[in-house]
Every structure is written in structure tokens, then in C-alpha cells.
């Protein structure tokens, strides 16, 4: 299998979670005492997702792939290999075992950068991205699930993450994995109400299509 399609979950201890009133994203939390959704699409003890994807951790030189995935997922050209090395992988707290890739025989696809806001207690999942041509195949679900197991194996008690209101596929993934809304900003009650209504509407459409 050629090393062409990648996704990753990275780790960087000591990152500060934005305080109340300063957070423009929606926030979720998930205690690690509860198991992940049993309808998982990957077994965390093995490195496969379906038949054509495989999960591995960071290897030296992966920075260019990580930057490419993030730029393709979120738009723009902000990230490159040098910025990734400078801001992420060269940090003394970086742990290559906490940075996961999804590989395929095709092309680079997905990544998720894992951070810690309170080392040993609260993990922070950040910058989960899947390239457009591989979206909708469960790669984001598999990466977040792998991150949850990584945190739990490390003794963490809770995981949090933030996302934009309009990223409904990602929001559905997080909810399916057991994450719950957290209201840390004055605007979150009304925003979560609107987002959850859209999620339920989308689920209703899918149920009709599956009949």
C-alpha cells in the first residue's frame, strides 16, 4: 500500500481553551468513562477502515501532507510544511504517537490534530479534516474515535472540541460519538437550538431515503 492518503490526529500539551465570551465556535464535551458508539466503523485495536483505508501514526516528513489536507479541508493556503514544523511538530510537547494518518492507495485524505488544554485530565481534539473527494466515507468518525481511545489510554478524563455552526456532517459525527453540547458563550443556546434542528431535519430526510 503506497503512502498516499493520510489523516492525522496530533497532540500539543498546554494549549489554552478560550474563555467564556471569547469563543466563536460551538463547543462539545465527552467524558471518557462512557464507551464509544458501538456502531463504530473501525476497530481501535486495528489499523483498518473498510478495505481500502489504513490508520497509522506520524512519521518524519508528514508535515507537507498534513498541511495539504488542512488547506483542502478548510480552504486557503495558510498551512505549509514549514509552518507545520514550526507551530506543531517541533514543539517539545509534541507526541508522534498521538498524530494519526489515514492512508489509501489513492491520495491524501484526512487529518485531525489533537491538543490538550489540561494535561492528564482534558483532551482537546482540533483541526479534523478530510479532503473533499474522500468525505462521507467515515474517515472523520474513525479518526476521532482513534483520538478518544488515545486519550483514554493516556488516563484523560474528558475530551472537548470546537467547530463551526455550518459544518453539519462533522457535527453529526461528533454527536454520534457521544459528544454533548456545552454552553460557554452567550450566543450558544440559540445557535445550538438552530443547529440541532438542522441535524434532526437531515436525519429525517435520510430515514425517508432509506425506506
Image: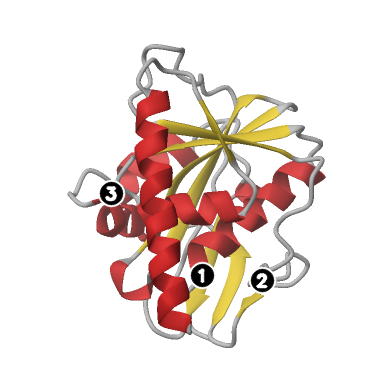
Q: Which residue is mark 3?
A: 80
Q: Where residue 155 sits: x, y (%)? A: 81, 36
Q: Nearer the viewer, residue 17 or 68?
A: 17
Q: Nearer the viewer, residue 136 or 190?
A: 190
Q: Where residue 202 sits: x, y (%)? A: 38, 61
Above or below, 205 relative to 111:
below
Looking at the image, is mark 1 or mark 2 earlier in the sequence? 2
Q: Nearer the viewer, residue 23 or 150?
A: 23
Q: Secondary structure at mark 1?
A: loop
Q: Where residue 207 sits: x, y (%)? A: 47, 73
Q: Secondary structure at mark 2?
A: loop
Which mark, by number, is residue 138? 1
Q: Where residue 90 sits: x, y (%)? A: 48, 37
Q: Which residue is mark 2?
A: 42
Question: Is 106 on the left or on the right of 148, as rendered?
Answer: left
Label 2, label 3: how far apart the Cα atoms are: 30 Å
Q: Residues within 10 Å of mark 3 (few under 14, many from 20)?
A: some
Q: Secondary structure at mark 3?
A: loop
Looking at the image, is mark 1 or mark 3 earlier in the sequence? 3
Task: Find out whether the residues at labels 2 and 3 contact each other: C-beta distance under 8 Å.
Answer: no
Amino acid at each position: 500500500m503506497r503512502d498516499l492518503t493520510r489523516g492525522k490526529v496530533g497532540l500539543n500539551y498546554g494549549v489554552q481553551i478560550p474563555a467564556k465570551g471569547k469563543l466563536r465556535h460551538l463547543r462539545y464535551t465527552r467524558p471518557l468513562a462512557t464507551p464509544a458508539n458501538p456502531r463504530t466503523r473501525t476497530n481501535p485495536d486495528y489499523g483498518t477502515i473498510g478495505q481500502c483505508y489504513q490508520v497509522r501514526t506520524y512519521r518524519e516528513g508528514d508535515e507537507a501532507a498534513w498541511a495539504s489536507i488542512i488547506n483542502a479541508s478548510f480552504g486557503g493556503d495558510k498551512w505549509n510544511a514549514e509552518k507545520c514544523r514550526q507551530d506543531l511538530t517541533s514543539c517539545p510537547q509534541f507526541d508522534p504517537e498521538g498524530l494519526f494518518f489515514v492512508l489509501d492507495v489513492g491520495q491524501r485524505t484526512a487529518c485531525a490534530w489533537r491538543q490538550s488544554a489540561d494535561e492528564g485530565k482534558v483532551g482537546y481534539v482540533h483541526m479534523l479534516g478530510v479532503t473533499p473527494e474522500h468525505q462521507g466515507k467515515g474517515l472523520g468518525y474513525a479518526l476521532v474515535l482513534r483520538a478518544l481511545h488515545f486519550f483514554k489510554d493516556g488516563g484523560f478524563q474528558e475530551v472537548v472540541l470546537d467547530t463551526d455552526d455550518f459544518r453539519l456532517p462533522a457535527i453529526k459525527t461528533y454527536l454520534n460519538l457521544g459528544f454533548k453540547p456545552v454552553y460557554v458563550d452567550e450566543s450558544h443556546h440559540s445557535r445550538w437550538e438552530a443547529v440541532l434542528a438542522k441535524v434532526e431535519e437531515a436525519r429525517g430526510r435520510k430515514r425517508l431515503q432509506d425506506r
